Image: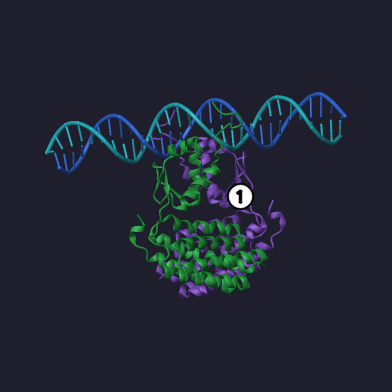
Chain colours: A green, B purple, C blue, D cyan
Amino acid sequence: MQEIGTPHPSNTTEDIVATLKSRIFSGELRPGTRLIETELSKAFDVGRGRIREAFRVLVGEGHLESLANRGVAVRRYTRAELLDMGRVREVLESLAARLAAEKPLTDERRTALREAQERMDAAEAAQDLETYSRENRAYHTLIETIADNAHLADLIERVRIPYLGLRLPRIFEIEQMRQSNEGHRFVTYAILAGAQDVAEAAMRSHIRAGNTHTAALPDDVFD
Amino acid sequence: MQEIGTPHPSNTTEDIVATLKSRIFSGELRPGTRLIETELSKAFDVGRGRIREAFRVLVGEGHLESLANRGVAVRRYTRAELLDMGRVREVLESLAARLAAEKPLTDERRTALREAQERMDAAEAAQDLETYSRENRAYHTLIETIADNAHLADLIERVRIPYLGLRLPRIFEIEQMRQSNEGHRFVTYAILAGAQDVAEAAMRSHIRAGNTHTAALPDDVFD
DNA sequence: TCTGGCCATTTTGTCGACAAAAGAAGGATA
DNA sequence: TATCCTTCTTTTGTCGACAAAATGGCCAGA
C-alpha cells in the first residue's frame, strides 16, 4: 500500500547517484568497499533495480568498479594509477588556471578570488592544516568556476576524487602547506593580472609539487 | 525454452555497452537519436533491464543523455560545448605527446610511429581525404598507446567522440590536410627525438589549428 | 589439529508484469 | 478550417520473483 501523492519512493536514480558520490568523495566509503544492493535498496526504500542503475552510472563515471558476479565496489587505485592521474590533473588544472586568467573578471569574482586566497593565508599563518585543506579544495573549485568550462570541471572531478577517498596519513605537513600556498599565491596573482601563461605555468608546477608527495606515499595507503 | 549451456542470452551488459559505443563512434547513431529500450531489447535478445543498465553506463561516460521520462538519446553538443571540449582536448593530447616523448622507445614502436607517419604522408600525396582521416585517427591512438597512461586515454576518448558523431560537411579540405600533416610531422620527429617540450608544443598547436576549423562550422551541423 | 569437500546463506544477474507518462490520432466545437 | 479535448498507443519507470554464483560454516577424515 502506498501513500497518496507519493506513488513511488521519491529517491530518484540521480538522487542516489549524488548521495553515493558524495559519500565516496567524503571518504565515508573507502576504496575497495563493496556496495550491497539489498542493503542500499532498504536504506533508500527503493527497488533493487534502481540501485543497480545508480551503480552503473557510477561505474561509467569511474567512481565504482564492477567485480563480475560480485557487484560493485568503490574504485581502488594503485600507486601507478595515482601517478598517472596526477600527470593528467597537472594539465587539466593548469588549463583551468589559464582559462580563468583569460576571462574578463567581474568585481565579485576578483573579490571572491582574493578572499579565498586570504582564507588560505590565514590558515597557513595559524598552521591549521584542517582548514587549509578545506580552503584549498574550495580554491581549486573556484578557479574551475571562473574558467567556466563544464567539460573541464567534469574531467577534473574524475582525477581529483581518489585523493579524498584515500585516507592519507597526513596530507599536508606544515612545510608542505607553506610551499603549497606559495604556489597558490602565484596562481592567484597571475589570474588577477590576466597573465595566462604565468597562471598556467604556476598551476602546473603547483600541482606537480603535490604529485611528488603522492609518489612518496607509503605502501600501506593502498590497502 | 533455452539452449543447454546458454542459460541466458550471452550478450553481457558490457558487450551491449561496447556495441552501442562503437555505433556512436562510427556515426551510425547520430547525436540526438533516441534509443528505444524495447527495440534494443529485441535486437540483442535480452531483457529490458539489461539494456537500461547499459544505457546508464553510457550516461555516466557522457555518451548518452537522459531525457526524464523519455529515456535516453545520443548526446548532442552545442557549438560552445564543442569549443570547450576542444580546449580540453588540446592539453590532453599534448600531454599524450609529451609522455610519448618521455618514454624510452622500443625499436618496434619507433618503426610503428614512422610507418604511421608515412601512411599519412602517402594519403596526403594522393590527396585521399578518406584514408588520411582514418590514418589520422590511428596516429593519435598510437601516440596514446605509447604514452601508456590509461586515464589519459579514457579522458581523451571522452572529448574526441563527438567529432566523429557529427556529420561534418567535409572534415578536411586538401589544404587543411596539408597543414594538419605538417603538424603531425613535427610531433612525430619530436617524439622520435625524445624532445618532450617540442612534442607537447607541436601537438598543442596542431590540435588548436583543428579547433579553429570547428569554430567556423556552419550552424546546421548542430541539428 | 589441520585439510578438504559439502551444504546453507547471502548476494548478484536476469526477466516478466504492471503502472505512469508522453505522444499521436481523431472528433467535436467555434 | 483551426483549436482544443479526449482517447489510444507507445515507451519509460518501477518492482517483485526466480536462478546462478559466490561466500562462509560445518563436518569428516587424516
Rendered location of residue B63, percent (x, y): 56, 50
Can you see residue B185?
no
- According to the picture, the residue beneath numbered tag 1 turns out to be B75
Q: Chain of mark 1?
A: B
Can you see residue A31?
yes
Rendered location of residue B194, percent (x, y): 45, 74
Q: Is residue A149 left or right of residue B187?
A: right
**Residue placed farthest to the front in the image?**
A126
Helix, strand or loop at label 1? It is loop
Rendered location of residue D10, percent (x, y): 63, 33
Vertical side of D21 occupied by A111: above or below: below
Q: Quadrant of the N terminus of chain B?
A: top left
Question: Which one is in front, A102 or A188?
Answer: A188
Rendered location of residue B8, percent (x, y): 43, 35
Please name the amino acid that badge 1 sits on: Arg
Residue D18 lies in quadrant = top left
**Classed neighbour count for the residue bearing mark 1: other residues with Cα under 10 Å, few (<14), some (14–19), many (≥20):** many
Residue at (34% x, 62% y) in the render:
A218
Question: Which one is in front, B213 or A78?
Answer: A78
Residue B183 lies in quadrant = bottom right
Residue A127 lies in quadrant = bottom left
